[in-house]
Image (cartoon, rainbow, N blue to C red):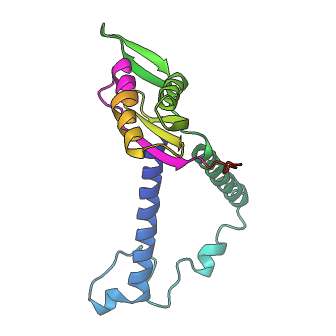
Amino acid sequence: MLGRFNRILLALTGLVLLAVGLAVLIGGLDLQRRWGFTMPDQWPFDGPKDVLFSDSARIRYRSEQWWWPAVITALGVLVVGSLWWLLAQLRGRRLRQVSVDSGDGSEAVLRGRALEGILAAETEALDGVEGARVSLNGERDTPRARLVLALAPHADPGGVLAGLRSVVLENARASAGLAALPAEARLRAVSHRASRVA
């Protein structure tokens, strides 16, 4: 949901900036006179010396009683909306629940943290894995797993990934009745102190 909102917000911001940029470009380069086309009467730029807001347009409403409350309200809504958006970005996007096919046509719900714990435990049981952190994101019926694996010095990364794919993820996918369980794994080595030999 948040990703869709971000895409819509980004698209609208881009369209507004594109429209303002084209308006400034057409007026600033005097393209309507050079290329011989006319713009609507409400067009803000008539030539390179025009500005977006004239002095009279900028001070027209200052003496009105509603002007300053409207400006303060609009800025307050903008600040609150920006803070909400920022907090939504910083908040974890973990999947809280996963839809599980119970086999009888109804839908069961599995806690996301429970599935994350199972995935982490099975991953840590693989040879060469010393630790695993798992987070689920996506939609309830199409979850995606993100794993960060801490590998021991003797670990075979190819073998770990093969075990992760064929055992851990396949077991989780089958037990939850999911059509697919895409995953992204990040591997990092665990640093150990050098041992002394006497």
Residue drawn at x 62%, y 49% as measured from the top left: 191
On the image, the x and y values in percent for residue 167 come to: 36, 28
Q: Along the horizontal axis of the image, is 157 left or right of 152?
A: left
Residue drawn at x 41%, y 76% as measured from the top left: 23
Q: Along the horizontal axis of the image, is 10 left or right of 89?
A: left
On the image, the x and y values in percent for residue 41 come to: 38, 76
State the count of labels.
0
* Residue segment shown in magenta: 170-190
Residue drawn at x 61%, y 41% as measured from the top left: 91
- Residue 178 painted magenta: yes
Q: Nearer the viewer, residue 124 or 70?
A: 124
On the image, the x and y values in percent for residue 38 come to: 30, 82
* Image quarter of residue 184: top left
Residue 131, relative to residue 35: is it above or below?
Answer: above
What residue occupies the far left of the structure in this picture? 36
Residue 148, relative to residue 32: is it above or below?
Answer: above
What residue occupies the far front of the structure in this picture? 198
Q: Nearer the viewer, residue 86 or 63?
A: 86
Q: Nearer the viewer, residue 187 or 142?
A: 187
* Image quarter of residue 131: top right
